[in-house]
Amino acid sequence: MNDGNTGNSVVSDGNTGNSVVSDGNTGNSLILECRDISKTYVQGKMEYEALKNVNFRMETGEYTAIMGPSGSGKSTLMNIIGCLDQPTSGTLLLDGQDVSALDDDELSKIRLHKVGFVFQNYELLARQSALENVMLPLIYAGVPVKERRIRAEEALHRVGLGDRMNNRPNQLSGGQKQRVAIARALVNQPKILLADEPTGALDSKTGEQVMELFRDLNREGVTILMITHDAGIARHADRMCVIRDGILTGEEAADEKA
Ligand code: ADP
Ligand code: MG
């Protein structure tokens, strides 16, 4: 079903044949479920257990933060949830689909259509304008050229950058660059927005502005999972979990915890 604002799927209507898991009570659907996810990095004879039996679930429409110190396994978990990496063991359900055993091609399709990624360092193409950066995922998705431009412009307006579309990254401030990255993450109407330390490279005032944008986007229906080492940033989410040494704990309201 379309919520009319974001184009994001809110609940399964039971007619489309989508395998979205609905809890049957609230009408909310489970967008993400990690079951006993573990990740062991192997380097030569050394093994490092970066994630230990992580269990975690999110429903469509949630805004959740995972907070933990540097080296606690945040990016490892985020990369697995975003299908950039695979767990050593455990099951990951994304939008009702078991993605744990998919091959690279299938995973890249899921990445393209179901998740939008935002990184600490924006990861924009330096030689391309803001508009071209935002159009890129639409090219991969095979969207016709005219529609690409329209949708990319809409996404840039949505993040407040309607007047900077032709600027290249070096002609934009850090906060503006992150807005371009957010527009790019949203342009394919993903089921979930994943943000790995989205304010990590920004001064605190600009970081707060990005948090305001996340709040607005979530009000419009965007499901957000953010990871951060910063309690002040995590507090902006509605729910917060804590990760330490690869162990995820806590399922508390963000205010109580921070
Ligand atoms: P965070 O994002 O919370 O700072 P990471 O998930 O990046 O933490 O890393 C968790 C732990 O796993 C760290 O101890 C890190 O050194 C280790 N690690 C991360 N990536 C690799 C890798 N590719 N090979 C070996 N160890 C890694
Ligand atoms: Mg990290």
Image: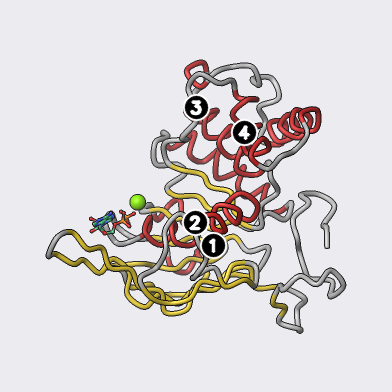
The answer for how far apart the CA atoms under marks 1 and 3 are is 28 Å
Instruction: Provide the secondary structure element on which disc 3 rests.
Output: loop
Residue that badge 1 annotates: 64
The answer for how far apart the CA atoms under marks 2 and 1 are is 28 Å
Q: Which amino acid lies under the numbered mark 4 shown in the image of this protein?
A: Leu
- Do callouts 1 and 3 mark residues in contact (Cβ within 8 Å)? no
Camera-near label (2 vs 1) is 2
Q: Is 21 drawn above or below residue 232 in the view shown?
A: below
Instruction: Provide the secondary structure element on which disc 4 rests.
Output: helix
Question: How many numbered marks does the figure carry?
Answer: 4
Using the image, tell me which numbered label, if any, was put on residue 104. 2
Earlier residue among tags 4 and 2: 2
Instruction: Provide the secondary structure element on which disc 2 rests.
Output: helix
Q: Which amino acid lies under the numbered mark 2 shown in the image of this protein?
A: Asp
Earlier residue among tags 4 and 3: 3
| Badge 3 residue CB within 8 Å of ligand 2 | no
Q: Which amino acid lies under the numbered mark 1 shown in the image of this protein?
A: Thr
Earlier residue among tags 2 and 3: 2
Q: Which is more toward the observer, 136 or 124?
A: 136
Which of the 4 image quadrants contains residue 163? top right
- The 10 Å Cα crowd at callout 4, few under 14, some 14 to 19, many 20 or more, is some
Q: Quadrant of the N terminus?
A: bottom right
- Asked whether, in this view, residue 217 is left or right of residue 63, the answer is right
Question: Residue 193: x percent and y percent?
Answer: 59, 52
Earlier residue among tags 1 and 3: 1
- Do callouts 4 and 3 mark residues in contact (Cβ within 8 Å)? yes
Question: Residue 217: x percent and y percent?
Answer: 67, 48
Using the image, tell me which numbered label, if any, was put on residue 136. 4
Q: Is 144 drawn above or below residue 240 in the view shown?
A: above
Question: Residue 170: x percent and y percent?
Answer: 47, 18
Earlier residue among tags 2 and 1: 1
Residue that badge 3 annotates: 125
